[in-house]
Each structure stands twice: as C-alpha cells, then as structure tokens.
Image (cartoon, helix red, strand yellow):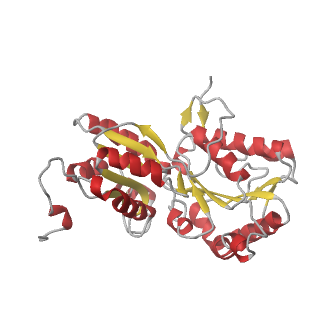
Amino acid sequence: MAPTSMAQALNAALRDALAEDDSVLVFGEDVGKLGGVFRITDGVQQEFGEDRCFDTPLAESGIAGFAVGMAMAGFRPVIEMQFDAFAYPAFEQITSHVAKLRNRTRGAVTLPMVVRIPFGGGIGAVEHHSDCSEAYYAHTPGLKVVTPATPADAYSLLRSSIDDPDPVIFLEPKKLYWTKEEVPLPVEREPIGRAVVRRPGKDVTLLAYGPTVPLALEAAEAAAAENIDAQVVDLRSLVPLDDETITAAVSSTGRCVVLSEAAGFAGVGAEIAARVQERCFHSLAAPVLRVSGFDVPYPPPKLEHAYLPNVDRVLDALDRLQWNDEPDITWLGEGAA
C-alpha cells in the first residue's frame, strides 16, 4: 500500500463528497485550475467541472457571504481560505451570519457549509501566513471547530464536516500536509466531537490537537527515556470538546500538560486547562500546565523555531510537575506562600 499524505487524503475526501452529493460545491481563491496553494483541490475542477469547483475574486468576505447564500439555497459549499490570517476579512460574515443564522431563524434556516483554513506555522512562511486562529472560532457559539492530525482523520473529519447540518471551521495544519501514513481510503467516518488516545500512559496526560499532536508523541518518547510514561490524547474536535475522554484520561494519570501552537493567553489551551481543573480537581496531583506559543506576533521565518513549542519545552513542563507525594506550592509563583 502506497503511503497517503494528509493533502492527498483531503483531496480524496473532497472528490468523494462531490461524487456522492450534487449539492456539494468547492470554491475559493485559486482552487480551480491551480488546485489551491497547497494543491488540496488539485484536479478537482478537471474532474467535476467549473460549476462544481471554481475560483473566486480575491475577497474573503465575499467568499464567505456567497457561501451563506448558497447554503441557504440548499447547497453544501466547501470554501477555502488560502491562509489562516487571510480569513480575517471574512470574520464578520462568519461570526455575524454563519454562526447565528440557525439561532436567528429558530432553526428554520441551516447553513451546512465548511470553511477550510490552513493554519499554524512550521513551514517558514512570512507574516500573515502562520497564525493559529482557532480561539476566535471556538469562542463563537454556533460554529463547530475541528482539526485533524493524521491523513486518516483528515479524510474522515472532512467528510463528516461536509455532511454536518451546521457550519464547520475545518483547520488544516499546514506543516502536516505532507505527513504520510499507510491508510486505505476511504476510511470510516468519525463523528465530530470525539477525541482519541494516540499513546497510552500512566504517569501524565498530554492533551494536543492539530499541529501539536506529533510533538506530543515525540515528547512522550523522549520522556520515556526519563522513566515518565506519558499518555497522548488527540482532541481532534475543539467544538464540541470531548470532555468525557479528556476527563477519563487525566483522571487516570493525575497530571496534565496541554499543548497548543497558538499564543497562550486566552487561548484554547487555557479553556481546556480550566475544564480539566474543574472536572478532575480531586484526581490531580499537580497543577495543569500549558506549553504554547508566546504572546507575541508570529515571528519572521528564521525565528519561528524559537517561537514554536518543542520537545525541550514539553520536557521542561514535565519537570515542573509534582513527582512525589509532598505538597508543593512553588508553582504558584515566586514568593508565593
């Protein structure tokens, strides 16, 4: 079996959705003849025609607004925002209309649409090409937010997102586009809202999603050399969040580190840490820690290695956890008592 990349899995998911449902449309900037900046839609227009896969003007707010009208008319649009920060001009449409129309019409009008957004760093891109914008969407009621970390999940979750009656923000980790695994497509579709344990462990739980899942697995292997058995949970879905799997995983180890590539302050990682603390308080042997990007604008390409979370930072977090039965309040901060 030839290995399949995440980009190929996404392409296959779009093709299969288009083939099975005439109401599915794919459009955005350069998705037609070019096949998208990352070639996710490569060959789609040639196979399904310009009526099903087409290019739009360079106007993200127009792309999102057009998709709202198409969804209201009975279509299932799948739109592509070329890069994470390019989606910001469409943010008003997404938060004011896409997220609220079902509620505004008391369920009379639904918007079964998918907004595909390549996000995150790690590819040496310049400003406006490496943002992690998941917190904006996750904070907006009415939107579902998912992000795959494997080719199999990329196919499965995209198919489930296209089938969903509600709008889905589909975040694609750019640096994972070319990761490969041996997976026979199509794969069974996973429902949105279920996390998965990628690596069992008994000492500490690493919660990760999207681009930080491979980092969590690498850090777990490094921690094993220090006799720390780390469990890795891939969240896959940020909204809805699989509290049941998260709570069971953290309760089984008593320690938790949340990994995210986005800036730490008020991020998704902070929400996850708060929910873990609320639900697992009596099982925790140490405070819930976070490893994230820094609270600064994304740096130039030559400096992104200093910004992105890495194995050493995860191991440093593990060192900060309480590994004995003695009470330890030093984590409260310098001078705390």
Q: Quadrant of the N terminus?
A: top right
Which quarter of the image is occupied by the C terminus? Answer: bottom left
Residue 193 % position (x, y):
56, 52
Give the residue at x 73% y 74%.
106
**Residue 111: percent from the left, percent from the top?**
74, 64
Of residues 73 and 134, the one drawn nearer to the viewer in this rendering: 73
Q: How many marks?
A: 0
Closer to us: 103 or 163 = 103
Quarter of the figure with residue 9: top right
Classify 298 as above or below 210: below
Give left or right: position of 224 versus 114.
left
Tell me, yes or no, if residue 208 can be seen here.
Answer: no
In the displayed orientation, state which residue is furthest to the top. Answer: 1
Whether residue 191 can be seen here? yes
- At horizontal 71% and vertical 39% (from top left) the residue drawn is 12
- Image spot of residue 331 (x, y percent): 19, 62
- Residue 290 sits above or below residue 210 on the image: below
**Does residue 257 appear left or right of residue 147 in this picture?**
left
Residue 284 place in picture, x, y as percent: 27, 54
Task: Please name the residue shown 41% across and 70% down the image.
Answer: 266
